[in-house]
Amino acid sequence: MAIVAPFRGVRFNPEKIRNMEEVVTPPYDVISEEEGDKFLEKNAYSMIQLDLRNTSQDTGGNADRYVRARTLFESWQVEGVLIRDEQPAMYLYTISFTHPSGRKMTRRGLICLVGLAEFSEGIVKPHEKTFDAVIDDRLQLMSECQAQFSNVFSLFQDKDNAVIAALEKAREPEPFCSLRDHFGNTHTLWRVTDFQALAMVARYFADKPVYIADGHHRYATALGYRRQMLLKNPSLPPDSPYNYIMMYLCATADEGLSVLPTHRLLRYPGRFSADQVVAMLRQGLTVEEIRGATREILLAEALARMNEWTMTSPVPVFGLYHPGEDRCFLLTLQDECEQYPVLAAKPRVLRDLDVVILSELLLHDLLGIDHQRLVTERLISYFSDPDEAIDVAVKKSIHDNGVTPLLFLLNPTRISQVTDVADSGQIMPHKSTYFFPKILTGLLINKLVAGEKILRSE
C-alpha cells in the first residue's frame, strides 16, 4: 500500500545559522499576522519568509509574494544558508514536551517521502474536509518554489514499535539538529542512511495505509500539483519527485501521541440568561451546575470532572460556561446516541463523536442554530487553550451586543476514532482534532528537482 522512501533533505546550515530556534516556525496555518511579524523580527532567514502565512486570507499582491519566496529560497541556497544532504535518508524525529496536564512526554516519529495516492485509493486516508481557496494558495507557492516546505503529519499502525526501533538502532550517533521551540519543547533529529534499516521500513509500510492527522490541505496541494505535472507529461515516471510528498509519520500506539480538545465559543444570537439556555438544553440533556468558586476553578473543576467521567462512562459529557453570569454546568446525554433522531441519521462512526453530538444535537437541535448560519455569520470560535477561551468569552460577554457568548468544553477526540472515521470514508467536522505539539516548519525541506529519481529502498 503506502510507498515510503528516503530523500535528500534541505536544511539550515548550522555554520550560518547559530540559533536554529530563530528560523523555524510552527505550521503556516496556525500563525497569526502578529506572530509572523515577531518571527521575522527574530531572524531575516525565518521560515515565515518561505512557507508564507496563509495568504488566502490576504488581499492583493499574492503573486508577488510567491515570486519573492522563490527568490529567497534560491538565494539562501546560493549563500549556503540552506544546504542539501548528499545522501538520501529517513530522519528520526523526537519531540520532548510537557502535556497541558503536566506530564512529561516524548513523541517519536520519522520524516520521509510517501508516494502520493488519490484518496479514493484508500492508501492515504483523510478525516477532514479541505477548502479550495487554501489549496489554491498552497499550490501557487509549491509551483513557484518547487519545494515542499512543511510536513504532512500522518499516523500508521505499529503496535510493536518495529519501525522506530529499527531507525533508532541504525541512526547516526549524534543528532544533526536539537533545539527548543518558543513553547519549551525540545525537537531532535537524526539521519538514518543504513540501507538495511531503510529497506525494512519500506517493507513494513508495503501493506499498510497511512492516516492524515494534520495537513490535509498540504496533501491535497501535492495531489493537485502532480495532476498539473501529469498534464504536461502524461508519461511522468513513478520515481519522479512529483509523485511524492514529505511526511512526518507517527505510530498510533506511540506513548507520546497526544490529541487536545478544541473547545467551541458560540456567539448565540439574542440575549439569554443561563437559566434560559439550560432550559433549552434540558430537552435532551441532563444538566448539573458546578457551584461556589472563581471562574478559573470552575473551569478546572469542569474539565477534571469531564475527564473522570470518560474513564467510567461511555456517555458523552460536555462543559458549558455562561460568562455573563459566571456559571458553569456539566451536560450529559439522557439516552444512547441512536435514540436521538438527529444523531441516528448519522453513521455510527460519526454519531459517537463529541464534536458531532455538539454540532448536531446541542447547537442545531436543542439551541436551534442552522449549520449554514454558524458558518456565514462566523458564530463559532475555536480554542485549544481553555484559559484563552474563557478570557475571550468574558470579554465578548461585556462587549458583544445582541448575542450571548457560550463556551462549550469538550473532551479530546480519541486516536481510534480518527482512524475509524478515516477507514469508513467519512469526514469529521471542522476542528475535530488538535495534535499536540505541532511539528516545526524549517527543520527539513523537500526540494522538487525535475529529472531526479526517488530511490526506493525495498
Image (spheres, rainbow, N blue to C red):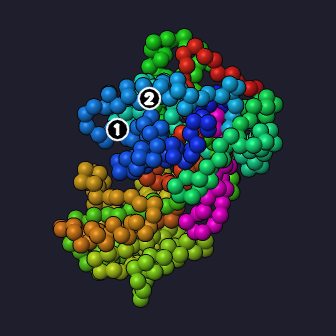
The quarter of the picture where the C terminus appears is top right
- Looking at the image, residue 443 lies above or below residue 117: below
Instruction: Report the residue marked by disc 1.
Output: 55
**Magenta segment boundaries in residue numbering:** 93-113
- Magenta-colored segment: predominant secondary structure: strand
Where residue 157 sits in the image (x, y, percent)?
68, 45
Instruction: Name the residue rendered at 32%, 27% in the picture.
Output: 63
The reply to whether residue 104 is in sight is: yes
Where residue 182 sits in the image (x, y, percent)?
52, 55
Q: Is residue 71 left or right of residue 183?
A: left
Identity of the amino acid at label 2? Leu
Task: Place residue 448 in its image quadrant.
Answer: top right
Q: Was residue 184 drawn as part of the magenta stretch in this picture?
A: no
Q: Secondary structure at mark 1?
A: helix
Task: Place residue 288 in its image quadrant.
Answer: bottom left
Instruction: Name the residue rendered at 46%, 54% in the picture.
Output: 432
Instruction: Report the residue marked by disc 2.
Output: 72
Instruction: Name the residue rendered at 24%, 72% in the picture.
Output: 398
